[in-house]
Image: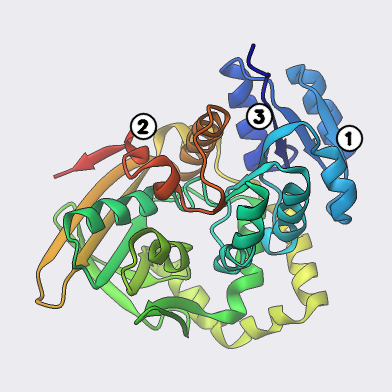
Amino acid sequence: MQKEKHWMIYGANGYTGELIARKACELGLQPTIAGRNREKIVQLASELKLPFDVFPLKDVNKIASRLKGMNCVLHCAGPFTETSEVMARACLKSHTHYLDITGEIPVYSLLYDLHNEAKSADVMLLPGVGFDIVPTDCIAAKLSKKMLDAKFLSLAFMGLAGVSRGTLKSMLAQAPDGSKMRKNGEIISIPQFSKSKMIEYKGKQLKFHAIPWGDVFTAYHSTKIPNIEVYSFFPGLFTNALQFLGSTVGLFKVPPLLHFSQFLVDQFVTGPSELARQTDKCYLWGEVQNEAGDKLEIRYETEEGYQFTVDSSILAVLEVLKGNYMSGFQTPSLVLGNDFIDKIPGSIQKE
């Protein structure tokens, strides 16, 4: 008789974590929901009739004791730059597979540094099982398979309906570090909005700006392509505002100012509405090029970003519970295949 496998959603009191918990219940799943806010976790667990736990992310040994018996954890508590390492280290101690929904390069780098420890513990570290970075990682892997000698990879997306508190708080923490790209295998920094690319969308040429998206780190491990750039489209007013603030973003390096800004986010930001999640779409584009100048591109349409994250993260967990895992640091396309994007409802490859 096969032993029943248990899993946990940590951060279920947050915007995305709660959406995932509710969807899991709709599918008849029974995750343990957990987080740091006792009142919200108890209330949600009572409503959904789910087992729950409440504990802070401070002591690795204490967290590991709470993870005992869990096959995997879906970590949804941001800012991930502050929460991922302690959770990942606890997973190594408890022999629990670690999945998260981050898109932050520093987190990917940190988890990659734990690769050998994870291999020794036979634990998988699989960050980015949501919109950050499943669709772009799968597109990168598809393109790499079609052009084996590709040396340049460009990825782009548009259409995010809005951001959650956790996402915006993470963006504020990373803002002083500028944007990122990979050049000849190395990640380099460039000023925010200093690099742009014109990409066709529905017959129009739109200006996309380079951003520090997670694929700058992960796509190199998925494809071995040494030069990687990721772009996103922003409304003109938004772009102008960020360029205006460019000289002041360094202030977010001062902890009290950063924490105050994040406090304001908690008070005034809610995330996309249910209508936006159900009706909006995201559009993705990818292109590879070899040294001879040959190019290949792929375009996709997907669900709204947060809805995509809900569906893809649960599907990723189910794959792990079925025994589909690889120990150590991994990327979605390496473990789940480059066709994983096609398994998410609403994902359509465009001509």
Task: Please state which amino acid type lies under the numbered disc 3.
Answer: Ala
Q: Residue at x 31, y 53 (%)?
A: 141
Residue 349 picture location, percent across and down? 23, 41
Give how far apart the Cα atoms at labels 1 and 3 are.
16 Å
Q: Report the front residue among 321 and 158.
A: 321
In the rendered image of this protein, does residue 167 appear above or below residue 13? below
- Residue 302 quadrant: top left
Disc 2 residue type?
Lys
Q: Secondary structure at mark 2?
A: helix
The correct choice, above or below, for 82 with respect to 176 in the image is above
Residue occupying image coordinates x 60% and y 15%: 28
Of labels 2 and 1, earlier in sequence is: 1
The residue at which mark 3 appears reads as 21
Q: Can you say which quadrant of the picture contains the C terminus? A: top left
Which quadrant holds residue 173?
bottom right
Query: How would you rate the neighbour count of disc 2 (Cα within 10 Å): few for under 14, some for 14-19, many for 20 or more?
Result: few
Where does residue 146 sit, x and y in percent of width and height? 17, 54
- Residue 36 seen in the current view: no
Please name the residue that numbered disc 1 is placed on.
39
User: Between residues 275 and 344, which one lies in front from this camera angle?
Assistant: 344
Amino acid found under the numbered disc labelled 1: Glu
Q: Is residue 209 left or right of residue 94?
A: left
Q: Nearer the viewer, residue 260 or 126?
A: 126
Badge 1 or badge 3: first in the primary sequence:
3
- Determine if residue 293 is in view: yes
Label 2 or label 3, whichever lies nearer to me, is 2
How far apart are the two marked residues, 2 and 1, measured between alpha carbons? Answer: 36 Å
The residue that disc 2 covers is: 343
N-term-proximal mark, 2 vs 3: 3
**Residue 174 numbered mark, or none:** none
Which mark is in front, 2 or 1?
2
